[in-house]
C-alpha cells in the first residue's frame, strides 16, 4: 500500500533527501503536502516534481506569489501554515524535518489527528518531549526516529526486551574542531565551523556538532524517545561516524548499527518501517577499506555544551526549553558573525543560570519560556 507523506522542512538538507527517497519509490510513497521556509526557488522546483495538495511557506508575500503561479494549489504560510501541513489528514506519515522548536505545535497537531511521526526535528523533543510522548501515547501514534543515532538505537533494540537493556552508547564525531583545544577555539571562523568532517548537513546542526550541543540534544532526545535514565546513556567519541550508536544489554552483548554516513538510510528506514527495503542509494560500507575504527572518552571540560545539555536534561522541567531556545538564538548570532564561537556556550549557561525551573510545564508555559529565553539572549549581547 502507498504511504502518503506530509513533509515539514522540504527545502532543507533532510527534506531534500526525503524527497529523493519518495521519488526513488513511487509505488511505495506519495507526497501530499509540504512546508518550506524562505527558499521559494527550491519550493517552485519541488512543486514541479510533486503535484501536492497543500504547501506552506514562511512569508505571506511568498504565499500570494505562489498562489498566482499555482492556482490549483492550496498555499498557506507562517506558523499556522506549518500546522495546516502537519495536520493534513490525507497523510499517513508526517516527516518533521523543520529546523527548531517551531516544529512543536505542528507535531502535536499531527499526533492529535493520528498521523505517524517520523522525527528529525530534535529541537521539538528537547523543548517539550514529555508533551509529544504523552500525546503520542494517548493517541496511539508511533514516533519514529530519523536522527542517525536514534535510528541506530531503534534498530539495535528491535525485537529486544527493554528490561534487558543496560545502556545506550551514542557516538559523536567531535565535529569540525575536534582537534582544537578550548584555547584554540577562541577565534575560529564561521566557515571553518561549517566544515563537518563526516556529514553534509544544514548550518545550524553543523554548528551544534562543532560545540557538541548536537550530542547534548541527542542525549535528551534518547532519554525522551526510549524512556532511558540519563545514568544509562553514554557518549563516546568516534571519529569515523561509521557506528551510528549502540545498545548494551545486561548479558554484556552490544548491538551496533553501522553504515556509511548517509542520512538517506535512517530516513528510508523510518519511512519503510516496520519493513526494510531491498535497496538504497547510499554507498555500501567496506570495513576492510576503512581498516580501523577509533573510540575515545569524552572530555566534558572541552565540550562544555554537552555538559550543559546533560545538566538541563537531568534538571528537567522548563530547563531543556531554555537550553534549546538559548542555543537556537546563540547559534543564529554566531552564524551572523555577531558573537564568537565560545560565546555560544556562555550565553546558554547564563540563560540556564538565570532561569527558575518550572516542573511539568504545559504547552503555553513552554512557548512562553521559549520566547522569553530568545529575548534574554538578544539582550545579553546588547
Ligand atoms: N541535516 C542532517 O543531516 C540532520 C538533521 N537533523 C535535524 O533535522 C532538522 C532539519 O535539519 P536540516 O535539514 O539540516 O536543516 P536545514 O537548515 O537544511 O533545513 C531546515 C528546513 O526548515 C525550514 N525552516 C527553517 N526555519 C523555519 C521556520 N521558522 N518556519 C518554517 N520553515 C523553516 C527551512 O526552510 P528554507 O530553507 O526554505 O528557509 C528548511 O526547509 C533539525 O532539527 C536537525 O537537527 C537530524 C539529524 C541529521
Ligand atoms: C547525521 C546526524 O545524525 C547528525 O546529528 C550527526 O550525528 C552529526 O554528527 P556529530 O554530532 O556526531 O558530529
Ligand atoms: Mn544525529
Image (spheres, rainbow, N blue to C red):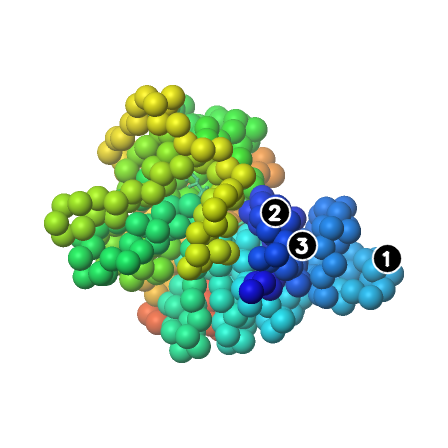
Give the left or right position of residue 362, taking residue 20 as reference. Answer: left
- Which quadrant of the view contains residue 26? bottom right
Where does the image place residue 153, in percent across and percent down from the top left?
33, 50
Quarter of the figure with the N terminus: bottom right
Query: What residue is shown at x 29% (from left), y 42% (from top)?
Result: 256
How many numbered circles are shown? 3
> Which SS class for mark 2?
helix
- 55 vs 327, left or right, is right
Q: At 52% from the left edge and 29% from the top edge, which residue is drawn?
A: 195
Vertical relation: 70 (above or below) 265 = below
- Please identify the quarter of the rendering in which residue 356 is found: bottom left
Residue 115 in view: yes
Q: Are marks 2 and 3 in contact (CB under 8 Å)?
A: no
In the rendering, which numbered label is found on residue 24?
A: 2
Mark 3 lies on a secondary structure that is loop
Q: Is residue 332 visible?
A: no
**Of tags 3 and 1, which is closer to the observer?**
1
Say whether mark 3 is within 8 Å of ligand 1. Answer: yes
* Mark toward the start of the polypeptide (3 vs 1): 3
The mark nearer the N terminus, 2 or 3, is 2
Tell me, for residue 36, which label it has, or none.
3
**Residue 177: percent from left, percent from top:** 42, 28
Q: Which residue is mark 1?
A: 69
* Residue that sits furthest to the left in the current view: 251
* Whole-number angstrom distance, CA of label 3 to CA of label 1: 16 Å
Ligand number 2: quarter of image:
top left
Amino acid at each position: 500500500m502507498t504511504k502518503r507523506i506530509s513533509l515539514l522542512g522540504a527545502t532543507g538538507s533532510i527534506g531534500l533527501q526525503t524527497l529523493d527517497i519518495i521519488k526513488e519509490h513511487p509505488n511505495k510513497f506519495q507526497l501530499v503536502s509540504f512546508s518550506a521556509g524562505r527558499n521559494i526557488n527550491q519550493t517552485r522546483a519541488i512543486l514541479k516534481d510533486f503535484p501536492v495538495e497543500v504547501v506552506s511557506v514562511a512569508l505571506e508575500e511568498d504565499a500570494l506569489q505562489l498562489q498566482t503561479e499555482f492556482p490549483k494549489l492550496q498555499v498557506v504560510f507562517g506558523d499556522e501554515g506549518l500546522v495546516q501541513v502537519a495536520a493534513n489528514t490525507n497523510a499517513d506519515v508526517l516527516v518533521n524535518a523543520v529546523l527548531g522548536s517551531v516544529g512543536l505545535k505542528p507535531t502535536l497537531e499531527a499526533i492529535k489527528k493520528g498521523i505517524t511521526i517520523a522525527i528529525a526535528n530534535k529541537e521539538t523533543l528537547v523543548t517539550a518531549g514529555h508533551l509529544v510522548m504523552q500525546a503520542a501515547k494517548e493517541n496511539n501514534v508511533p514516533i519514529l526516529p530519523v536522527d542517525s543515532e536514534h535510528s541506530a538505537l531503534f534498530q539495535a533494540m528491535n525485537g529486544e526486551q527493554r528490561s534487558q537493556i543496560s545502556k545506550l552508547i551514542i557516538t559523536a564525531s567531535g565535529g569540525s574542531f575536534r582537534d582544537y583545544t578550548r584555547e584554540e577555539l577562541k577565534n575560529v571562523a564561521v566557515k571553518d565551523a561549517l566544515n563537518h568532517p563526516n556529514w553534509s548537513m544544514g548550518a545550524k546542526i553543523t554548528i551544534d556538532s562543532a560545540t557538541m550541543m548536537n550530542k547534548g540534544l541527542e542525549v535528551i532526545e534518547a532519554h525522551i524517545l526510549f524512556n532511558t535514565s540519563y545514568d544509562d546513556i553514554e557518549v563516546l567519541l568516534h571519529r569515523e561516524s561509521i557506528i551510528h550508536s549502540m545498545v548494551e544489554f545486561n548479558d554484556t552483548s552490544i548491538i551496533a548499527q553501522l553504515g556509511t554516513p548517509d542520512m538517506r538510510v535512517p530516513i528510508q528506514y523510518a519511512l519503510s518501517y516496520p519493513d526494510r527495503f531491498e535497496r538504497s542509494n547510499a554507498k555500501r560500507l567496506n570495513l576492510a577499506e576503512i581498516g580501523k575504527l577509533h573510540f575515545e572518552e569524552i572530555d566534558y571540560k572541552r565540550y562544555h555544551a554537552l555538559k550543559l545539555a546533560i545538566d538541563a536534561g537531568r534538571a528537567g522541567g522548563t530547563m531543556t526549553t531554555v537550553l534549546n531556545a538559548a542555543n537556537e538564538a546563540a547559534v543564529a548570532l554566531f552564524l551572523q558573525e555577531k558573537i564568537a564561537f565560545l560565546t555560544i556556550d556562555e550565553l546558554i549557561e547564563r540563560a540556564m543560570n538565570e532561569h527558575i525551573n518550572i516542573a511539568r510545564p504545559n504547552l503555553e508555559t513552554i512557548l512562553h519560556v521559549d520566547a522569553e529565553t530568545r529575548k534574554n539572549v538578544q539582550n545579553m549581547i546588547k
